[in-house]
Amino acid sequence: MYVLTSFLLSLVTLFLSLYLYMKKCHKFFEKSRIPHIKPHWFFGNMKDLFLKRKDVVAGYQDIYEELKHHRFAGFYMLHKPSIMICDPELIKIILVKDFSYFHERGYPRVVKEVEPLSNHVANMTGDEWKNLRIKLTGTFSSGKMKMMFPLVKKCAEGIKPALNKYYSDDEAFDAKDLNARFTTDVIGSCAFGIEANSLQDPDSEFRKMGKAFNEKRWKTSIRYLFPQVPVFLIKLLNLETPPPQMTNYFTNIVRDMIKYREENNITRGDFLDLLISMKNDKKVERPKDQNDDVDLEKFVSQIGTNYKKNDVEMTIELMAAQCFLFYAAGFEGASNTLMFLLYELAENPEIQNKLRNEIISAIDDNDGEFTYEMMRKLPYLEMVISETLRKHSIALFLIRKCSENYKIPDSEVVIKKGSSIVIPTFGLHFDTRYFEKPNDFYPEHFSDENKKKRPHYVYLPFGEGPRVCIAERFARMQITVGVVYLLKDFHYEVSPKTKKPLEVIPTAGGMKVKDGIWLKCRPL
Ligand code: HEM
């Protein structure tokens, strides 16, 4: 009896302590005088999400719908307060003008000694990030993209033979798998300088390694939940991202490739070449490029001058990590955008036909050749890509961590150092104030006329400000080339195997579609 009473008393005390703690945390917005949604005492504003009554996308959309008429407002992830910025002008101030307060995303720290491949520019912070970002920004200029165009095109030539395997026996194919293999070949060629050949051989070693990395993203989620987990536990529980055998595999490719190129004086015009030239010319702080359309001066002024400018030593490990970036930060974005685009075209045959006509007549007018310059002459394709990136944005939201107490302009509210800021990409992309038909696939959202009508900073597929996606040009080029090669020889339709509605799950790497997207294709 005594044991039972003590047990019950302990339970009640525990529950009461938890209740009082949560209540105290949930006073934050009230005390700060920030408008917010009334929280549940335990779940905060995440009740439907935690009880799986709603998926993550729908859950966040509901929060945005409740908050969207405020310039900024608060919500609680369990006990943790987050501030959502809804006003486009304020979004601009936070992402660009007052960037120096918001230069971090608050990602879990990288332990360089045990996970050197994660030591890439997307994960870096402070001066380390600034110095490397300045150095790498020029490697994604239009001039450099023109150099990489033939490599991407060569990979895209593998799409036709890969698809030919599917239409012959009238079977549906998985658009997710096909585009993942194309993206893998592009990463192999442009970042690592190898022929990955995964379009023809789905079991190629390079594809298997990349696939394994993307499937292991749940480990990243654990690191988000426990950002300060000690190194010995990371090792003990195998939480290194990526795991050691993957680190060895990708680092060895880079090491061997650099040695081979240096010994044989070989250049290919790829990303690795650019890294090698940085390694060998330590004094060059930024890549020199006459053909550069990257405004580095503006970029440097945006990131602020209060940082220690230092040259970066390009070690093999650091170079390997930047090559791996194409997997870690770029893979899901590029391959998913192509997958969703194909799905939307299969669902919307009129759009598909209009797009194909544009592509085929541009190629015909150019003596049957698809060239880099032609990419600018495909306005409808650009609209279709932009609409795909709106409706199927890879990121549910952008995040920033406040690095110093920050007074929100035209308000009395001070955002405390360490607070999380959420910019609701998805919410903005589906807001009828900015996009007339948010739930449709409607490329006219991106006609010149409609673009002019919208405020800036409501369309954010690649983010904005100095921490914007470094590779937007590369990603757009890869997607454009991919779509040209997918459409010029084949027509796409939904099949009885196509799952509707699609089950989309946001993960640390981007949106994932459960069970793939099964389509039918027939040759033209
Ligand atoms: C369609 C394809 C892609 C999409 C939609 C996309 C989108 C994004 C977004 C939303 C961000 C966050 C921006 C912010 O916080 O403001 C980002 C960051 C980044 N992306 Fe991409 N991305 C794509 C492809 C790529 C590729 C191919 C690479 C390859 C190198 C890449 C490299 C990066 C890097 C390095 C960052 C972090 C930049 C920094 O912190 O300085 N992305 N991307």
Image (cartoon, helix red, strand yellow):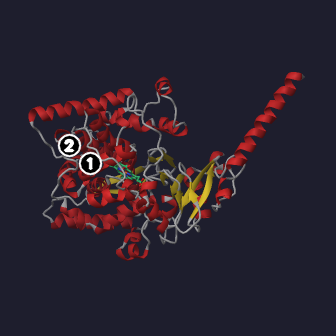
Q: For residue 355, which quarter of the picture?
A: bottom left
Check disc 2 and report its element: helix, strand or loop.
helix
Mark 2 and mark 1 in contact (Cβ < 8 Å)?
yes
- Counting every numbered tag in the picture gives 2
Q: Position of residue 307 (x, y in %)?
A: 35, 49
- Between 520 and 156, the one nearer to me in the picture: 156
Tell me how far mark 1 sits from mark 2, CA to CA: 8 Å
Is residue 357 depicted above or below 335 in this figure?
Answer: below
| Disc number placed over residue 508 in the picture, else none | none
Q: Position of residue 354 (x, y in %)?
A: 32, 68
Q: Which residue is mark 2?
A: 278
Q: Residue at x 26, y 48 (%)?
A: 135
| Disc number placed over residue 135 in the picture, else none | 1
For the residue carrying disc 2, how many other residues have a C-alpha within 10 Å: few (<14), some (14-19), or many (20+)?
A: many
- Between 488 and 73, the one nearer to me in the picture: 73
- Which amino acid lies under the numbered mark 2 shown in the image of this protein? Met
- Between 84 and 184, the one nearer to me in the picture: 84
Q: Quadrant of the N terminus?
A: top right
Q: Position of residue 493 (x, y in %)?
A: 39, 56
Furthest residue in direction left, as rendered = 264
Going by the image, does 144 lie left or right of 336?
left
Q: For residue 459, which quarter of the picture?
A: bottom left
Is residue 246 depicted above or below 224 in this figure?
Answer: above
